[in-house]
């Protein structure tokens, strides 16, 4: 019973004293509200301007359209500020009038969303209550975010010099004899049926401290090279030499696959138009236009397999898997390059070391390459 009575007294006392406000406190509240209105509308305007800049960078709108939209947004928020501030100025005028009439202690603003500071006394102790509203919490959260973003920009993170990409490439795979491109016409391997696949990651670092066009691109990739011989042939290992021989059965599938891990490095010229922050600071925009990459790679083979499929005399499907290195070099190296627009490009690579030991045959590949940010 005593506990219930105490809570009831506390509640009634809080209600009674919460309605007693001083002139200075009311003026401060109105001033804070005007400041809050201004900050809120300026933040909304800033967000609209940033979105307009993004649309301009993506070429969704022209420069003239961007200027017009920015002006319309500025005029709109200026009008909102003027109208809301006028309401608060009327409240201030009424407050001054109430002060002159001696009614200031009875001024109550039920619609006010600023901080409410109340106090009440029980016995010899005085208690203060502070009630915060959602609008102020949102504004303060936005201010904290702006401070963090400013700190983030001061550290230079908005001038990020390195980005990463997922790389996927595929195309046709064959060999050149004596580095002669014309030897493709007489190759022992099927041109359109011999494929390669490449999957990996790359990092792209700007060569200059400021926004520029030249980058160093490096990474790691896994490569699957397939060679399908012509005329029912397959690979035969004869000591330190690997030859092509005719298989005794009529094969439906015959391919030599070697898997390798590569470490490619390219100099890339990216002609994407650089972006710009609201304060005029230049920033990189990559993979948005023409790109040219020239470089090399080095790596090692992870394994080599030969797959042969045919039907025997009884019509039974036979699948044969042969595991051996087939006298291939473990380490490989070569040159590569690409010509791309945005994330898609034409890709060429050529091994400088022979495919098989004691031969002048070298692997050659060309196809399509995708660099996804």
Image (cartoon, helix red, strand yellow):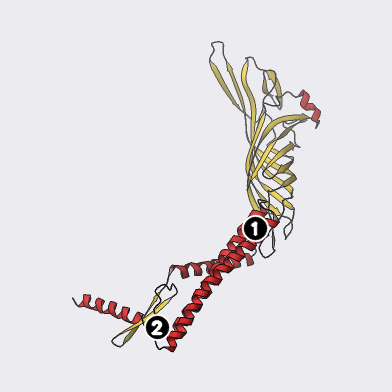
Looking at marks 2 and 1 on the same chain, the residue that comes earlier in the sequence is marked by 2
Residue 183 located left or right of residue 61: right
Residue under pointer 1: 53
Nearest-to-viewer mark from 2 and 1 = 2
The one nearer the camera, 349 or 62, is 62
The one nearer the camera, 113 or 79, is 79
The one nearer the camera, 284 or 241, is 284
Task: Tell me if residue 157 can be seen.
Answer: no
Question: Which residue is painted at 78% across and 24% down in the image?
Answer: 185
Q: Label 2 to label 1, Cα distance in Å?
A: 47 Å
x then y, percent, for residue 89: 51, 78
Label 2 sits on a secondary structure element that is loop
x then y, percent, for residue 231: 69, 18
Residue 35 located left or right of residue 176: left
x then y, percent, for residue 165: 63, 47
Question: Which residue is painted at 62% across and 43% down in the image?
Answer: 200
39 in relation to 302, above or below: below
**What is the residue that sits farthest to the top in this orientation?**
313
312 in relation to 22, above or below: above
Residue under pointer 2: 21
Label 1 sits on a secondary structure element that is helix
The one nearer the camera, 362 or 284, is 284
Q: Residues within 10 Å of mark 1 (few under 14, many from 20)?
A: many
Tally of numbered tags: 2
Quadrant assignment, res 309: top right
């Amino acid at each position: 019973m005593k506990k219930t009575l105490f809570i009831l007294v506390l509640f009634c006392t809080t209600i009674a004293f919460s309605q007693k406000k001083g002139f200075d406190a009311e003026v401060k509240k109105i001033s804070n509200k005007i400041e809050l209105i201004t900050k809120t509308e300026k933040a909304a305007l800033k967000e609209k301007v940033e979105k307009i800049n993004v649309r301009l960078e993506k070429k969704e709108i022209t420069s003239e359209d961007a200027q017009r939209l920015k002006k319309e947004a500025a005029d709109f928020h200026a009008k909102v500020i003027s109208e809301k501030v006028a309401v608060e100025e009327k409240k201030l005028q009424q407050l001054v009038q109430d002060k002159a009439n001696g009614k200031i202690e009875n001024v109550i603003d039920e619609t006010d969303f600023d901080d409410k500071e109340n106090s009440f006394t029980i016995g010899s102790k005085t208690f203060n209550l502070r009630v915060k509203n959602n609008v102020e919490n949102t504004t303060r959260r936005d201010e904290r975010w702006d401070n963090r973003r400013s700190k983030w920009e001061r550290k230079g993170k908005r001038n990020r010099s390195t980005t990463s990409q997922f790389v996927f490439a595929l195309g046709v795979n064959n060999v050149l004899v004596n580095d002669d491109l014309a030897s493709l016409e007489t190759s022992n391997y099927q041109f359109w049926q011999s494929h390669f696949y490449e999957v990996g990651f790359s990092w792209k670092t700007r060569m200059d401290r400021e926004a520029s066009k030249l980058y160093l691109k490096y990474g790691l990739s896994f490569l699957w090279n397939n060679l399908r011989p012509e005329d029912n042939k397959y690979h035969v290992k004869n000591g330190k030499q690997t030859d092509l021989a005719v298989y005794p059965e009529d094969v439906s599938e015959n391919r030599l696959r070697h898997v390798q891990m590569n470490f490619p490095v390219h100099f890339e010229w990216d002609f994407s138009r650089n972006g710009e922050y609201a304060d005029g600071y230049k920033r990189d925009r990559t993979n948005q236009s023409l790109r040219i990459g020239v470089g090399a790679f080095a790596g090692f083979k992870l394994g080599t397999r030969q797959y042969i499929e045919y039907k025997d005399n009884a019509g039974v499907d036979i699948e044969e898997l042969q595991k051996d290195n087939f006298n291939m070099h473990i380490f490989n190296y070569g040159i590569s390059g690409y010509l791309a627009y945005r994330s898609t490009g034409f890709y060429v690579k050529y091994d400088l070391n022979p495919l098989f030991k004691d031969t002048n045959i070298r692997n050659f590949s060309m196809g399509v390459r995708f660099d996804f940010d």
